[in-house]
Image (tube, helix red, strand yellow):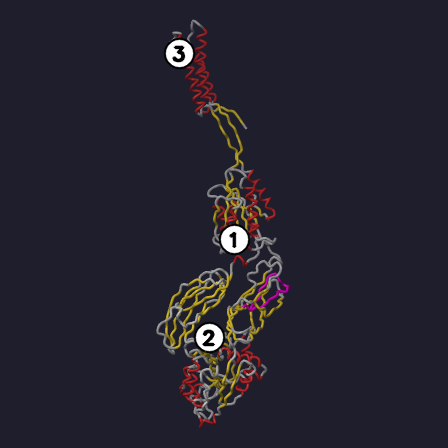
Amino acid sequence: MTSFAFEPIYGSLLLTMAVGAVTVGVILAVTPPTENPTRRRWLISLRLLAAFALLLAAFRPALFRTDNQLTEAALVIAVDTSRSMTLPDGDGSSRWETQLEIWKRLADSILGLDRELDVRLLAYDSQTRTIAAPAVNSLKAELPSGQTTDISAAALGAMQAAQGQPLAGIVLVGDGTQTADQQGTGAQRVAETLNSLGVPLWTVPIGPAGGASASRDAAIEALPESYQLFAGNELDVKFQLSTRGMAGIDVPVRLTWIDSNGKTTEIANRQIVPANATDVTSVSIPILTPQPGTYRLKAEAVAIEKELVTTNNAQVAFVEVRAGGGRILYLEGNPRLEQTFLRRSLRRFPDLALDYQWIPNDTVDRWPVDLDGAFDQGRYDIYIIGDLHADALGNEQLQQLADTIGKGAGLVTLGGSYAYGGGGYADSPLATVMPIRMNSGRVRSPGGPNNPAAGSQIDTQLKPRLSRSHPITDFGGDSPSKIWNDLPSLLGANRLLGPKIAPGIQVLLESEMGDPLMVIGEYGSGRTASLAFDSTWRWWRYGRDEVHRRFWRQLVLWLLSRENNADSQLVITMDARRFATDKPPEFRAEVQAVGEQSDPTPLIAEIVDSNGDVSSLNINTESSSSQSSRMTQAIRGRIPELAVGFYRLRVRAESLDTTLPQEELAFQVVDESRELAQPLADPVYLSQLADLTADHGGASFLPENIDELITTIQDRRSLAETPVIEKFRLGDGPFTGWLLFGIFAGAMSTEWFLRRQWGLA
């Protein structure tokens, strides 16, 4: 639109007109008459022309032109680059693929919408970053790798991305799940700020929003990280099956052995039917352990239709299976019921060979009894000593037995009148072997009256109570302690002074008053167990024969552990065998040596991945010595952050010229990402944020309605016009200014020249 107006000096048109009239009058008055009237008219005309130029400048005529133009503004589009975008979107594609298509359609329509609109692309997960020079293919170089999502940081970052420009709007694309620890006031406060500024927030939620089928998930939990088992033993594998959205649906669960070569063997399966929409089921599956070796035991819930997340459907335990057979020599002084049922239980197992030797107390005049090399190394794997006085064997044979235990045999001592201190063992060579302390003042003469020392016996009936979990005392079931509590009471026990304070010694059973009833330990390369009781036969008599067999079987198998027959061995321990990528544990490897070790062997630790690639670890070395002339050398370190998968921690001597065998310990790095643990999107949250700016056009759009969003942006952009007024005033520019000056100067110069020519000057 064009208009014309005057802008006179001093802002008064009347004054300017008066000045013009006076000027004309003065010009007419001061121009004298001439002999030639034509000359006078010329002079008046030139003076009037000069006056006209001056009066025109005083009136300052102006031409106004009004036009509508779009305002300069920034449109920020924020896209989600967290790991949850790798999950399905509910329509067969991943959320990331859906987001790529959304950006492509937005970019095709918005990037060239108008010159004044500055489109800015923002990527967000736990933090935000601006992608320079956004184009249709800008997201192809991005990967959804963020560990957490912070919606509030995304909204705030979108506001800041405008960098001082007015905001035309913000488009927030993502699944709407807040997995990062929220800082500050949250995205809601940012949306309220946008509303106060008149800026619309448009959201595009991606992913399934809920419902029974969309939220289906099964997870295996609480499977132990590792087992140390014996071949041919029965194991109850216990774990939990957590389900969501699967009420009344059969969930297949299976157990699989995976050997060291990767061969898989399915060994058991179950059908679990959850009763509730959200359910946790305790599962216990009995299995038989395979041949000796190292295995992985995989518990898996088979994925069902429409289950979005399957990374939590399985857990793996690391299993070391040891040889279970052995030869046993049982020495007894009194033919009690205990020996009858103990022999009955152990002889039921074909891999155990048991020899029984009764040495009556009335043969004391022939003590010590010559057992004809029964204590020679390799003759027997386990020795059981019942209610037998130490003098029946003599110090020479007991010393031979102690040496054999130190070289790898096992020893079990039972309670009785002539057990421990009462039987003279406190001053015998076995005193250093047993894991308990003994009082030599309690010794009784063999064949004497049945009057044990005061305070040496627990005469009341008692129920052993678990002190700690251990393969010997674990009978399966949901609660090992409850099984022990349900067993028939024992008929008294020896009152032991207590366990020795040494590495490896543990109290497994104790009385309700805290008296130790079963203590285990190690001596050299052998293992020992001291039992204060001698009446487990009551379990058999009262119908718990399966518990009786299992207890003695597991005790014998634990004693038969043959870790290494060399003088030195490596023992590796880790704080955890199954851990998340961001929580690597510490490890310790120890060289255990019997006897003197003059030059400690330098050790190195390595990580071996599933492809066989080896990487060295940083370690700290430490050395120490302990009792029994045992020298130990140890290294410590921490597992580095690793990708998800299976690995082996290998520790070996740095020098290849050594007899020390290397050891390996398998472990697993698992994915515990918060992003993948929540398979559902939260479109309601994104819609609520957009609704906070509804007064200014904010709204939420589904991916299939992205064309409506494009139309909304275009319509809002067309309303963002501002009138622009252009003014062209006479004299303001150099052209019109010089033109007026030229007219004035030309008229006056011509007037003066004519007067000179005509003789009027």
**Horizontal and vertical percent for residue 122?**
50, 47
How far apart in space, not on screen, are marks 3 and 2 (Cα)? 130 Å
Asked if residue 642 is positioned above or below residue 653 in the image, the reply reads: above
- Label 1: which residue? 144
Q: Is residue 752 above or below residue 164?
A: above
Is tag 1's residue or tag 3's residue first in the polypeptide sequence?
A: 1
Residue type marked 1: Pro
Majority secondary structure of magenta residues: strand
Are the residues tagged 1 and 3 within 8 Å (C-beta)? Answer: no
In this view, the mark in front (1 or 3)? 1
- Left or right? Give the position of 99 relative to 637: right
Q: Nearer the viewer, residue 576 or 461?
A: 576
How far apart are the alpha carbons under marks 2 and 1?
47 Å
Q: Which range is magenta?
A: 239-258
Q: Residue at the right extreme?
A: 248
Of labels 3 and 2, earlier in sequence is 2
Callout 1 secondary element: loop
The quadrant of the image that shows the C terminus is: top left
Residue occupied by mark 3: 753
Name the element at disc 3: helix
| Quarter residue 626 falls in | bottom left
Looking at the rendered structure, the kind of residue marked 3 is: Phe
Of the residues under marks 2 and 1, which one precedes in the sequence? 1
Tell me if I can see residue 59 in this picture.
yes
**Which dot marks residue 563?**
2
Picture coordinates of residue 685, whole percent (x, y): 56, 52
